[in-house]
Amino acid sequence: MPGISDLYRRAISLVRVGVTCLVVSSPLLISVRAQEASESDYRAAQLARMQKIAESFEITLPSTGKVRSGTLQATPVLRYADPTRRNDEATLWLWSERDRPVALLAVEYYAKSPVGPRWLYEVASLSPEKITVQRGEEIRWTAREPGQARQKLSDVPEPAAASAARQIQLKQLRQRFTAHEKTPVEGRIQLRPLPNPLYRYQDATNGLFDAAVFAYTNGTNPEVLLVLEVARREADKPAEWTYAFVQMTGGEVYATLDDREVWTRTEADPPAVRDAYANGWLTDATPVNPTNGPLTKKP
């Protein structure tokens, strides 16, 4: 058994080792924390930049005798990236009117595109009307068709009385649908459904019990949207479940219901315009963030 002096010497030795490790590791710890702070600042600056771009777009809807404007939600419904497409940072923004979705705008940053850093926008209509999208003098586009071609869904339950129970019903019905994308290089890509809806809404005044917007993604990048609604249009009629798909990509996309193809959209390589979807590169959105720092992440 060691004596007291031996124990003392060992204790002193352990303390010295601990102090040495602390001194050696402190610069590394400081460096890691500085990198984390830099990354956090970068993401905050990017978000501010993307919000500024979204706020520069105006969505209007036609009406008898006047034009109405959609309301941009204060925060994006989704933030994502897609390294397989060289997409470094992106957000998805929603405009609504009385809580009903009117349009979605994707703002995507490509730091390493073949022609240098630049921003891409994608706008898709979710409105039953032909929306108009404007951004200063650079962009003005009016959809040729309404955003949703709603179809009746069969073999469905009576809508539950409780909101939580209806959300379960919405998620269960979503499982009957699939979506995939085709690209010249990668071929067929099965898109992954996000487990929770991007947006959920109601319109009791017009008989809409519940509705949800689901996303099918490449990684976390939304390529196809599924909009499920349950409504009773007439008091003496049963509630009706309906669905519609929305294009949110320049790729060629397909969707199925119960393993049967029910929807497709052709390729729309930017810049492109389709019936209810448009995309393009922003010429005036220079890649400089609000903190005046470089937008490209440091290795």
Image (cartoon, grey):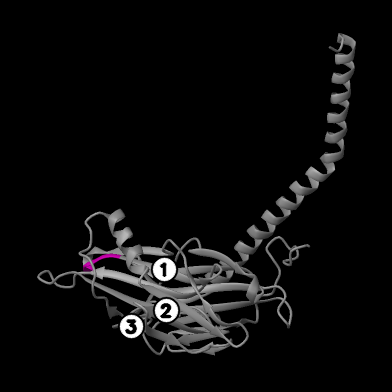
* Snapshot quadrant of residue 284: bottom right
Query: Is the N terminus in the top left, top right, bottom left or bottom right quadrant?
Result: top right
Residue 7, relative to residue 255: is it above or below?
A: above
* Snapshot quadrant of residue 204: bottom left
Are there few (<14), some (14-19), or many (20+) residues within 10 Å of tag 2?
Answer: many
Are there few (<14), some (14-19), or many (20+) residues within 10 Å of tag 3?
Answer: some
What is the span of residues highlighted in magenta in the rendered image? 206-210
The kind of residue on which mark 2 rests is: Val
Alpha carbons under labels 3 and 1: distance apart? 16 Å
The kind of residue on which mark 1 rests is: Phe
212 with respect to 81 (left or right): left
Alpha carbons under labels 2 and 1: distance apart? 10 Å
Q: Name the residue furthest front.
A: 1
Q: Residue at x 48, y 61 (%)?
A: 74
| Dominant secondary structure (helix, strand or loop) of the stretch shown in magenta | strand
Q: Earlier in the sequence, mark 3 or mark 1?
A: 3
Residue 258, relative to residue 21: is it above or below?
A: below
| Whole-percent x, y for residue 15 in the image | 85, 24
Q: Residue at x 67, y 74 (%)?
A: 86
- Report the residue marked by disc 1: 214
Nearest the camera: 289 or 231? 231
79 with respect to 157 (left or right): right
Which of the labelled discs sits on residue 246, or is there none?
2
Alpha carbons under labels 2 and 3: distance apart? 9 Å
